[in-house]
Amino acid sequence: MPISENPIGTPVSLLAMNNETWETVIGLEIHAQLSTNSKIFSASPTAYGAPPNAQANLVDLGYPGVLPVLNAAAVGMAVKFGLAIGAEITPLSVFARKNYFYPDLPKGYQISQYELPIVAKGHMDIVLEDGAAKRIGITRAHLEEDAGKSMHEGLGAHSGIDLNRAGTPLIEIVSEPDMRSAKEAVAYLKKIHTLVRYLEICDGNMQEGSFRCDANVSVRRRGQEKFGTRAEIKNINSFRFVEKAIHYEVARQIDIIESGGKVLQETRLYDPDKGETRSMRSKEEANDYRYFPDPDLLPVAVNGAFIAQIRATLPELPDEKAARFAAAFGLSAYDAGVLTASRELGDYFEAVVKLIPQDPKLAANWVMGELAAALNRDGIDIAASKLGPARVAGLLQRIADGTISGKIAKEVFEAMWSSGTDADSVIAEKGLKQISDPAAIEKAIDEVMARSPGQLADYRAGKDKLFGYFVGQVMKATGGKANPAQLNELLKKKLAG
Amino acid sequence: MKPEQISAIAHLARLSMDEAEIPSYQQSLASILSFVSDLERAQTQNVTPMAHPLPGLTQRLRPDVATEGDAHERYQANAPQVAASLYLVPKVIE
Amino acid sequence: MTLHTKSLAALAAGLRAREFSSVELTRTLLARIEAYQPQLNALITVTGPSAMQAAAVADGVLARGGAGPLTGIPLVHKDIFCTEGVRTTCASRMLDNFVAPYDATVVAKLKAEGMIMLGKANMDEFAMGSSNETSYYGPVRNPWNPQLVPGGSSGGSAAVVAARLAPFASATDTGGSIRQPAALCGVTGLKPTYGRVSRYGMIAFASSLDQGGTLTTSAADAALMLRAMAGFDVRDSTSVERAVPDYVAALELPLAGMKIGLLKEFFEKGLDRENERCVREALAVYEKLGAKLLEVSLPNLGLSVPAYYVVAPAECSSNLARFDGVRFGHRAKDPKDLMDLYKRSRGEGFGAEVKRRIMTGTYVLSAGYYDAYYLKAQKVRRLIANEFEQAFAQVDVVMGPTTPTPAFALGSKTSDPITMYLNDIYTIGANLAGLPAMSIPCGFVHNLPVGLQLIGRHFAEERLLSAAHAYQRESDWHTRIPAGYE
């Protein structure tokens, strides 16, 4: 059912989120591919993009007689994640078989963990744009193997199965149903995404499918204790789609209930082209997975020494870094969060601040502003930035010492970005030094005043708004280089007469 | 065992089951289940289930090294239907 | 020269002394296989040409003086072991066209020893059965009487050894599938401790119960084979990191003072009186040799068959899910959709007993039944294992009958699955507890062999083999050859 829009253009669901009648309940299940060299139960490589079935060996193919052997690095990464979310690590965790039939599941069962996952209860704190903070509970995280991929197009009456991905290690992170809006869900998702990249256990590449999210969405009337029936939206692979899918789904469910119907517990897919969720035909029926401990694998023992070893490899975590930035550099919690969204970005920012310690806020604004915009435009990561921290700091120094105005700095930045040179070279080459000589500014003001008698008269008669006109004209005459603060002061004096 | 139960189990196990076969499975399954229901008389409170016959063993960990190469042509020699190195099944609509 | 009646040790000695060649030996046995295949149906695949080639290579090694104790000696592998480049069917239509792309660890190890594979032995389909009557390729017949079953699931392997078609056949035992056919065919069967022999490449039936083992004409030969087959395998997570003792050197372990436990529950009603007589006569020999007989009791042992018939089907229902017509094995013609592909490929590929066990296993694992059946059975399993442990605190070896009766007629127990299941009543306990166990010939009833079962503590194969060897020095039941096969 399409989302109906009210006259102002806000989707009904958004209204619903802030609604008196309805409350949204969201839980997320995240599947993050662990960046190991080999698969979780076989020695096949895990690199993305290989030709079909080139990385599927006998164990991955589920051939008769083969057996799984557990990858040590996968265990280490799971423990690392558990420690980072403040969770208990289960001393003896057990692999279980999840039995169902699907072509991308060669053995007819997925090796996962059921009753005894390696990571028990933990949490993740999120900060929303308005500064509100919330703790999202994480029920558990466990190790399991990924399935293969099915292609449905271009093969006529067939689907084609590529098992390269089958056996790639996954960590499945299950949140409590603690989120109450799409915004919270996205904030949580981004935080987990940031964390797994900080820990270097997952590359977080959503386009390649190494970080996927299933959203369990339900609605209930405010005040109702019981949760409503939930629908599971599977395999959403972008933050934007998560938000949209949730909005759509909430509106759909409210619509159903308000029309007297019942929400079905089912699996749905988000269709980004149509902007809607639809029922997954192939997984229509509730599956009885018949979990039982996998007899081919023994319980996984994780002792204190192992945990201590992993703990020693933990980097400064995003929350720790953000808190440190906020305190040390006087940043808001939200801004600190943005600047620590990735380790690389945090390190970059910190490097810039080191070179311009007197004005961390300036550094923050520029890194989150111009630099971020340039990276976005060029579609690159901070790691591929065309300007290193020293270059950017160099530019900021010239703003701080008054050589150029903030506005001119933007022009300088663009030039630096395309040529890769330093600020001073660009300023010199383009002659962009700020004019801070009062005499020069006064001369320019006099010239403008002389050729604008009408505006002058109107201003003096009370039209204060014309001040901007004079500012603009002087700026134009000086090629934008007049020191804005000085210009303001001098202009005021001169216009007053 | 009821016919619907037999059909349901056969479906879960992806085994073809036509009407004529059901009675024989009803009988044999009922017989087997009755036989194993003897287990009920065992005193098992406080007994932990035994998943592995040798006590106290834990899972060995393998070093994270990729040692397998591409042998898909050899493996696909056994496959009933392959195209463009993909295993084919009747089209699945998701 | 009766090459086909020589023990492994005698064959090794003869080959090394150049009394005969591996080619000659191989040719002799291949001829016997061909001659007796119509009446026994013990093999599914015969690998004549490659066997002759391998024999020639072995002769070269023997000539250069580089031979080991098993170089140039032929064997047969149960068709449950993957053999690279050779059809591996598990006696099922599902794998009728399956050529394994790799060697099972056991196969590779014995190949490395220079042994010559003559072919793949017939068996019950996917190792499910106690009579070798569920094979897609027809039943195997007992060399002692062709109207009777050889036992199962390793019926083909046992028949091969009994008929002297090969001095060794590999086999597997999940609920008695080595020991029971050994008993019914008058040969020596050994199921090692769980984890002693690698399961990699051994097509899985019930993963926590399956173990690969040996069928030979004597304990001395079994020791030779176990020494070559056993050992830790990095590719099998359930394989145990424990040194392999020299089982051959340990054969002469003194018997005197050994305490033999007679399980009260093994001698209750249901045991054929004549079988019991043979077993008790064997026990008397042990007493004469200096062993002490004590009575022990495992009160929950009677639940071993019900527990097994929950756990084994459950595990097999999952292990056999990979047979879906997609990547290998039987595929139904012109499937109209995915569901049809699955259901018809599996419906056509699997035989009745296999389907029955898959259905049972699916049911006992399903929602609402898991606790009452599967979990309960695993708890009973622990009770039985604990009781064995307690018994082994008092005795060194448990002994008793291997089967309740001698070989029975083909078709006589196929109408009710339970009747067939009760054949395993004495053997299943050792699988549930992961204990090593053997069956050795201890007499005849109406010209049919009777087996004596020996069960030991975990990793006490030396004790079992030496005890069996001691008895075989005092008796000659194990040297008897069925009429027509001499």
Image (tube, rainbow, N blue to C red):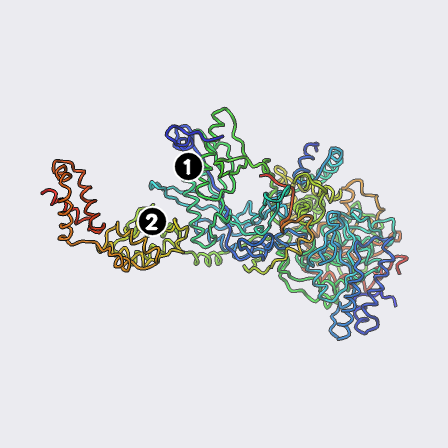
Q: Position of residue A188 (x, y in %)?
A: 42, 43
Q: Amino acid at mark 2?
A: Met
- Mark 2 nearby-residue class (10 Å; few <14, some 14–19, many ≥20): some
Number of numbered discs visible in the structure rendering: 2
Against A212, residue A422 (above or below) is: below
Q: Chain letter of disc 1?
A: A
Q: State the image coordinates of residue A371 (x, y, percent, origin top left).
A: 34, 51
Q: Is residue A71 left or right of residue A358?
A: right
Q: Which quadrant of the structure image shows residue C366?
A: top right
Please identify the quarter of the rendering in which residue C422 is found.
top right
Q: Quadrant of the C terminus of chain A?
A: top left
Residue occupied by mark 1:
A181
Residue B38 visible, this angle: no
Q: Quadrant of residue A135?
A: top left
* Residue found at the far front of this picture: A451
Kindly tell me whether residue B21 is visible in this rendering: yes
Question: Label 1 sits on what residue type?
Answer: Ser
Q: Residue furthest bottom?
A: C64
Distance Cα–Cα, label 2 vs label 1: 25 Å
Q: What residue is shown with label 2?
A: A368
Dot 1 falls on a residue whose secondary structure is loop
Is A415 placed above or below B45 here? below
Q: Is residue C356 left or right of residue A467?
A: right
Residues packed near mark 1 inside 10 Å, few (<14), some (14 to 19) or many (20 plus): many
Name the residue rendered at 80%, 45% in the picture.
C270
A162 or A258: which is nearer to us?
Answer: A162
